[in-house]
Amino acid sequence: LGGAVVVSRPDDRWGDVPVVVTTVPVSLQRVRTEVGAVLGVEARPVEVVVVESIPFLASGKPDRIALSSRVTAQSQ
């Protein structure tokens, strides 16, 4: 996936669950299959969120806090 970041989202059952945030539309099933094959079924994301752009920190790293907040707010 070009331009993708994995963040966590709170979940009542599991505590936190992985969510893929990407600038490229991709099916959840495809991501779950590929991640599950490499990292195991426990690592499969529960959702794919497509955004126009991924915010970055001054250091050049993705702003995971902003993305996680956005994903959490969107799921409520």
Image: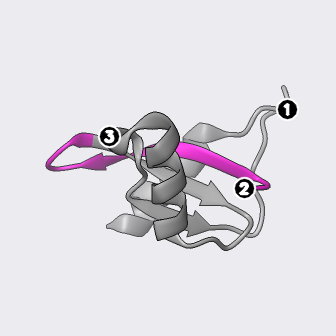
Give the vertical position of 72 relative to 7 (above or below).
below
**Looking at the image, is 15 positioned above or below residue 45?**
above
Of the residues shown, which amino acid type is indicated by label 1?
A: Gly
**Does residue 40 appear to the left or right of 56 in the view shown?**
left
Q: Residue drawn at (32%, 40%), measured in percent from left and top?
A: 42
Up-down: is 37 above or below 30? above
The outermost residue toward the left is 13
Spatial CA distance of label 3 from label 1 is: 29 Å
Question: At which x and y percent is residue 25?
Answer: 67, 73
In the picture shown, does residue 57 fall above or below 74? Answer: above
Mark 3 Cα within 10 Å, few/some/many (few <14, many 20+)? few
Quadrant containing the C terminus is bottom left
**Tags 1 and 2 touching, CB below 8 Å:** no
Please identify the residue farthest to the top as the structure is shown: 59
Quarter of the image for residue 58 reads: top right
Q: Nearer the viewer, residue 21 or 1?
A: 1
Residue, disc 2:
1
Lower sequence index among marks 3 and 2: 2
Q: Give the range drawn in magenta.
A: 1-15
Tag 1 secondary structure: loop
Name the residue type under label 2: Leu
Instruction: Return the residue nearer the eye: 14 or 33.
Output: 33
Per the rendering, the mark at residue 60 is 1
Magenta residue check for 8? yes
Q: Quadrant of residue 8?
A: top left
Give the residue type at disc 3.
Answer: Glu
Q: Which numbered disc flags the more N-terminal residue, 1 or 2?
A: 2
User: What is the distance, in whole Å, between disc 1 and disc 2 at their CAs?
Assistant: 19 Å
Q: Position of residue 45 (x, y in %)?
A: 43, 52
Query: In the rendered image, which residue does mark 3 sit on?
Result: 42
Label 2 crowd (10 A; few <14 / some 14-19 / many >=20): few
